[in-house]
Amino acid sequence: MQLYSTNNKAFKVDLKQAVMNSLPPDNGLYMPTELPLLDPNFIKNLADYSFADLSFIVAQHLIGTSITKAALETIVHEAINFAAPVVELNEHLGVLELFHGPSLAFKDFGARFMARIMGHYNTDEEKELVILVATSGDTGGAVAAGFLGTPRIKVVILYPSGKVSPLQEKQLTTLGKNIEAIEVNGTFDDCQALVKQAFLDKELNKSIRLSSANSINIARLIPQSFYYFEAWKQFHRAGESLSFIVPSGNFGNLTAGLLAKKMGLPINHMVAATNANDIVPSYLQTGSYKPKTSVSTISNAMDVGNPSNFSRMMDLYGSTWNIVTEEVKGYSYSDEATRIAMKEIYKQFNYVMDPHGAIGYLAAKEYRLKHKSTKAVILETAHPSKFLEEVEEALNTKITIPERLAELSQRKKIASYIDVDYGVFNDFLVNRFSK
């Protein structure tokens, strides 16, 4: 597998370099030089495969001989060892539950796959690897769970102070071992900017081996394509068209769906559902991309003002606005609309959705006004208990917290606190990890 930089298609690396270095030196993002078409018979007969088995076939087509078949099969089956069921709300609308992994969020798929890929490539390296990750909520918990106890790999998670839910914060700050948390006095975009600056700091990278676990890393993106095939297997019927409604922040999840479509999965539309941070829906309406400072919402994992994966979306379609708008639709909603949607879903379907999924529900309703013949699958990206206060207040009912999340609430938070200052962050890394 060869990959190029979105800023320079002539700059190419192999999979190991792309995964372990995360970012190209020109600050682009890595993309595969080829997206092979899957055999139409494979798509037609998806029902014949388990989730892990179909994931392995998709991964093998993408990755090729960069990892041996036996090693890749082990990686995939260890990472994809929990379900992604589609719950049918009605004949036209399904919910793909992506919260059945260790951290109760969709990021578990990418984090677990990436941890094993990195562990595979790291066995022959002398220096330990330091993973840097910025999180607006769920990424950090998934990465912490995915890499916990991995030999010779340390993880540093940056998160915005006061802008993640209490239980999300406990997932980042209570595990210990090889996981460290940094609480940043700023936004997610500030956290992401600090991480990117560290990767581009040549002096720092001479003394510390750095990589990323954000969706800027291609190893996070690849496994996120798997569950689109799994959802298609469960909810598609012959002769029907199917679209996916994706609650979106950094747009890695939606981009993974576009990869699945490019590989032959016959998706009608990918639909971006955002909160007040509506940069991509605004672009789809106007053709003008205008990043801005993110604002805080109750769907905090989507509080992103400059989505990293936008450049990958544009790369897939040659930065041509009219083509992108044919493939991708976009809608945005307020916190108040989100709360009303959570109540409506609970009353109409007796189904509890988190705020992110509720925004997906609103987008699905609006989308189907113009696309009545198209079935839609909403990606429910996190368990509603991770947003306990908001969900219980909206529904006026108690939500059961899964045991693996509930037990974290009793643990002590341990985190360093810094302002948005690259010099301070650099000093932290040098003092902790430079030898």
Image (cartoon, grey):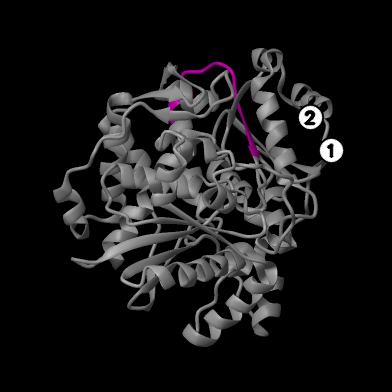
What are the residue bounds of the magenta stretch? 120-133
Residue 253 place in picture, x, y as percent: 48, 49
The amino acid at mark 2 is Phe
Left or right: 145 in relation to 172: left
For the residues labelled 2 and 1, the Cα–Cα distance comes to 8 Å
> Quadrant where the C terminus lies?
top right
Residue 211 place in picture, x, y as percent: 58, 28
Q: Going 60% across and 81% down the picture, which residue do you hit?
A: 343
**Local SS, label 2:** helix
Above or below, 27 against 254 in this view is above
The residue that mark 2 highlights is 425
The residue that mark 1 highlights is 418
> Quadrant where the N terminus lies?
top left
Does residue 263 appear anywhere in the picture? Answer: yes
Above or below, 190 against 400 in this view is above
The amino acid at mark 1 is Ile
Residue 72 place in picture, x, y as percent: 32, 35
Q: Going 24% across and 66% down the picture, which residue do you hit?
A: 240
> In which quarter of the view is residue 39 placed?
top left
- Tell which circle, 2 or 1, labels the residue nearer the N-terminal end: 1
**Local SS, label 1:** strand
> Disc 2 vs disc 1: Cβ atoms closer than 8 Å?
yes
Does residue 402 appear anywhere in the picture? Answer: no
Left or right: 379 in relation to 400: left
